[in-house]
Image (cartoon, rainbow, N blue to C red):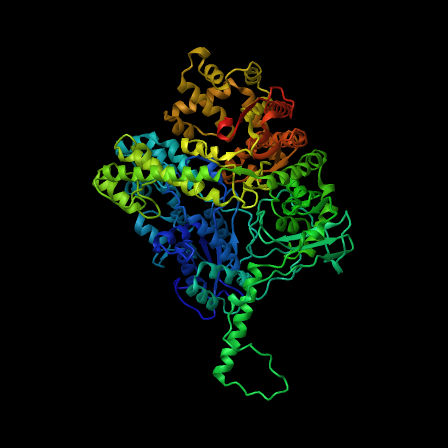
Amino acid sequence: MTTPTDDAPNGGQSTANPNTLVLIDGHALAFRSYFAVPPLSNSKGESTNAIVGFLKMTLRLARQANNQMIIVFDPPVKTFRHEQFEGYKSGRAATPTDLPGQINRIRAIVDAIGFPRLEEPGYEADDVIASITRMAEGRGFQVRIVTSDRDAYQLLDESVRVISNDFSLIGPAEVLEKYGVTVRQWVDYRALTGDASDNIPGAKGIGPKTAAKLLQEYGTLDAVMAAAKAGTLEPKGTREKLIASEADVAFSHQLSCMVTDLPLDLELGVGRLPGDPVQLEVLLDELELHTLKRDIAAMIGGTGGPGAEPFAAKGKSAPGISSQTQMPREDTASFEAPTLAEWKTPAQNVTWGYVLSREDDLTAELTGAATFDGKAARVAPLIEPVRDTASAAPAPGGLFDDVPDSTAPTTPLNKTQQKAADKLVKDAEKAAQKLAVQFPATVSEAEFIGQRTVTAAGAKALAAHLNVRGLKVEPGADPLLMAYLLDPANTAMPAVSQRYLGTLWPAEAAGRAAITHRLLEILPSKLDEPRRKLYEEMEVPLAAVLTRMEVRGVRLDSAYIRGLADATSGKIARLEGEIHTHAGRVFPIRSRDQLEAVLYDELGLASGKKTKLTGKRTTAISALEPLRNEHPIIPALLEYRELEKLRGTYLEPLPKLVNARTGRLHTTFAQTVAATGRLSSLNPNLQNIPIRSETGREIRKGFIADDGFCLISADYSQIELRLLAHISGDKLMQQAFLEGADIHRRTAAQVLGLDETTITANQRRAAKTVNFGVLYGMSAHRLSNDLGIPYAEAAGFIDVYFSTYPGIRQYIDTTLAEGREKGYVETLYGRRRYVPELNATNRTLREAGERLAYNMPIQGTAADIIKVAMVQLDAQLEALGARLLLQVHDELLIEAPEDRADEVAALTQRVMEGAAQLSVPLAVEVGVGPNWYDTK
């Protein structure tokens, strides 16, 4: 591959053995495309500019037959760098509100085309790209990386290049020419210069030219720092800057190092995956990307074929499936495809397999269902919907008006007529395929009548689907819950099926039923006694509780939310006027380029570092916050942005998500997602309703009770600190909770050696920051930033904290030692999390693993305790006419009859505080009100 733009015929990775890996940072390319392509949208108003730019770039590269395209995205959760440094990437500009939806569309299109797509929980796309690059070493592959992140320069060598915006290649020579350092010195260079967009500090006062000069003279960062500390580095000013920033430089070096040893399950040198041509056409038609549709069809060129057989490739996962760290490795059990038999009314003890048109969506259709009784699989009949085929593929008048007489003589069609007829047939076939996707055949809920429980993989989703449609069915035995308890990396059935049976999770219900049945035979014996109890007494009963909560939903005062949206729009308009007045002219505030010019050129405000992506001066919130008192335009801008986000993220979407029949919001609670055992809320996420700003808190006023009912909020108070006191056995911390003391004031007094009555608000705040920060491995660097104090003072505070509470240090050390020996850590209930990173040779990876390891027993036990409380409360609340609505981490939201509010509140507090017996008391704060806001 001489250049990245050479075209080859019959592209689409049709060659059997591609020799060039093209690794695309999906988020980076989407972000770049969003700003590079003018605003575009389809006729429904859905933005498409990022999608168009992304696909044009990708198709240009995919046309080369020797390229293996691999698309890598950042995971939807925080990475280990965010856990290591809370301010990581906070310098980046706010994500445009219409970009995340486009990225989700891009993911779907990538999958439908058949490009391998990887996302690794806890790691950035950069780390996955780095690990693939190292996998390719010594195997004859060329590697081409599409990314905006210059950290990728540390990967460059003779066979690895970055593709720049103009499609030129950046290699070691280009880096040396532009920056004055070698690629081996790149991480050292970044540690010195820092990166404002990632909020990596670097050495204060050391710019790119000085950093390059130092590395040219001394060779390495270690040598530079050694010379500075020895007093031999000149000039003196540079030496003093380096010494003053020593901790920041070391920290920046850690953050800049890519992880290169992720255990990825990826086959190199293979072509495009089969994809889903029908779904691809539906997506492109919905987005109205007609030109790109033709380009993609030309690129695919008929390759790819239909999907794999349901039980094909036994023992081998499809190329490109992202792997998660799995500890320990399992020997796979045998599995054989099921024999099919005629459908009959199922008995109570059958195992179900099912297919929904969409996951985590209560409005999804049941497009397939089957039972397996240990001998044969039986597929439930489908009901075809009435489809408006006439509007989908109109035929020319008269063509099908009469049925022709087959015995009558026919006139042969000429070439033009035959071509037109063939096209009509193809158009009709395509239209039928599209309609089948949009309006699929479904299984009637009547097939489940008589079933009291459903045994299935992901039984909660099937039970919720049936309950929504009027059948009272509870989720039963579920191998996904078992596998999740065996290892929380088992979050979905494709991984479970591959791991324990060595077979792919099929697309059809009969195969799913048979696999589920086989897993229920082999997985129970793998559970030890604590995890068997977790399964039988916590997770399975909780699945039934969550099913009822999902079906029940929570009432939303849509009129209030719309009114709040209108009021917020008024505030935004007023702020726009203020901003224009302060600027001295009218300009589009959402245009970052014009805002940059107003702030830094016209008003003369001090600008920070330029952003890595665009090379322009940043207008991000993190850059504006320090300027709050410099000019009145800044506080107006900050408030404007906050209100814009609230309006676009919550106020406008929430009323549209209310179910028209129930008048309530219905979320889905994901039970097998978080490694700590916590629940997650999806579609919509009701666990992230904002509480920090006043307008954000007012959103909770829109969550209301039914007539004659009230809402009750019950929230565990400082449960993680109480668990820390219990698990660590630290007597001093335990004493504070036993005496009912203000734990943060008590901590400040004990650490600072002062009387509690003399503790100031700032001293208490510092203690509170450390109390909670120690649970997440807070560094002195982060404490220094959070409190605005010198690094040495922050480090001293942490040292004294651990000497004051030696039990906490002992807990951390013991947990890490046991974790390294066993390979896992666990909660008080025996829930495990495997942490192989504890023994990693990569320091950054190992330290991230350490923070996960000593946090998990605390956070995981807190999650277990509230699950116990939910299971115990469910039936007791129902007896009083009350019902659980939401779980938000340590808080439960309950709807209760107004005349029994006190009784329900007392019951809830009693059950939650008695859910676990600890050496310190659990405390629950309970509030009652007509809406969620007023319960606090």
| Depicted 909 relative to depicted 131: above or below | above
Farthest front residue? 708
Q: Is residue 847 found left or right of 619 in the rendered image? A: right
| Depicted 230 relative to depicted 137: above or below | above
Which is nearer the eye, 595 or 777?
Answer: 595
| Depicted 82 relative to depicted 151: above or below | above
Q: Is residue 184 found left or right of 894 in the rendered image? A: left
Q: Residue at position x 55%, y 59% from top?
A: 438
Q: Report the number of discs.
A: 0
Asked whether the viewer can see residue 452, the reply is yes
Location of residue 231 (image quadrant): top left
Asked whether the viewer can see residue 827, the reply is no
Which is nearer the eye, 882 or 379?
Answer: 882
Q: Residue at position x 52%, y 57% from top?
A: 111
Location of residue 793 (image quadrant): top left
Residue 778 at x, y percent in the picture = 47, 29
Which is nearer the eye, 502 or 456?
Answer: 456
Residue 726 at x, y percent in the picture = 60, 22
Residue 607 at x, y percent in the picture = 27, 38
Residue 72 at x, y percent in the picture = 48, 52
Which is nearer the eye, 743 or 48?
Answer: 48
Which quarter of the figure is the N terminus placed in? Answer: bottom left
Q: Is residue 310 found left or right of 735 in the rendered image? A: right
Location of residue 691 (image quadrant): top left
